[in-house]
Image (cartoon, rainbow, N blue to C red):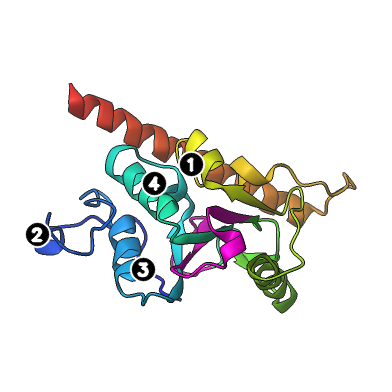
Amino acid sequence: MPIPPFNLKLVGDDLRRYDPRWRYGVPPRSNANFAWAQHVVSKLTDRGRAAMLLPEGAAFVGGGAAKGIREGLVFHDVLSAVVSLPPGVFAHTGISPSVWILDKAKAAERKGQVLFVQAPELGITTGRGRHTLAKEDIDRISGTYRSWCSVGYRDRAGWCRSVTVDEIAAREFNLQTRSYVGASTTGSAPQPAEQRVAELTRELYGHFSDAARLEAELRNILGEL
């Protein structure tokens, strides 16, 4: 699974307007996330599949070029699934990441759909903002995706949902999992202090993402004046 550096800027000759990889639009120079995504898509065969990591903000931050590329991935049926993960699962960043699964040969019954899996509450906190997923957590995520691709899948409130292209379009191609999956249905038993701290940390990172989105939108507006 490729782990590109998150949110890098494109400089110099990194961005060529007529690059054949930019099938869904020229990526914004201010952020290379969708340059990486389109680069991966360009390497897939007609039946190719790939998984890559992107920061959570890539799912919703930015209009214009970023939104257009998200739209292209959805409408061309290349995006298969988005899985949100806990913050701190990778040593080089505390940003909440997500796994995007790209598939150029979806099963017929899954055409025009995207699976959203909301998994930021899985795993355990291991200190200093780090988070670790156990094997059973990984198996749960992969098992959900496999069942969606074959048989036996069903939506689970607070965990996973299969969403149509039309609904995604109605939400202006916002690909945040929590926008579609909804709240967890688990009980409200008292939480251990460590779990509560992890929950508040995730909430804080969510506010950071919202702030980044609002800043990007403000910069776009000011740039048009």
Nearer-the-camera pick, 39 or 122: 39
Front disc: 3 or 4: 4
Instruction: Report the quarter where the C terminus lies.
Output: top left
Please, what secondary structure does the residue beneath circle 4 have? helix
Amino acid type shown at disc 1: Asn
Residue tagged 2? 12
User: In the image, which residues are magenta?
Assistant: 90-116
Q: Are marks 2 and 1 in contact (CB under 8 Å)?
A: no
**Whole-percent x, y for residue 118 in the image:** 65, 54
Q: Which tag, 2 or 1, sits closer to the chain's start?
A: 2
State how far apart marks 2 and 1 are (Cα): 30 Å
Residue tagged 4? 71
Residue drawn at x 75%, y 75% as measured from the top left:
136
Q: Which tag, 2 or 4, sits closer to the chain's start?
A: 2
Residue tagged 3? 4
Q: Which tag, 4 or 1, sits closer to the chain's start?
A: 4
- Residue 23, can we see it? yes
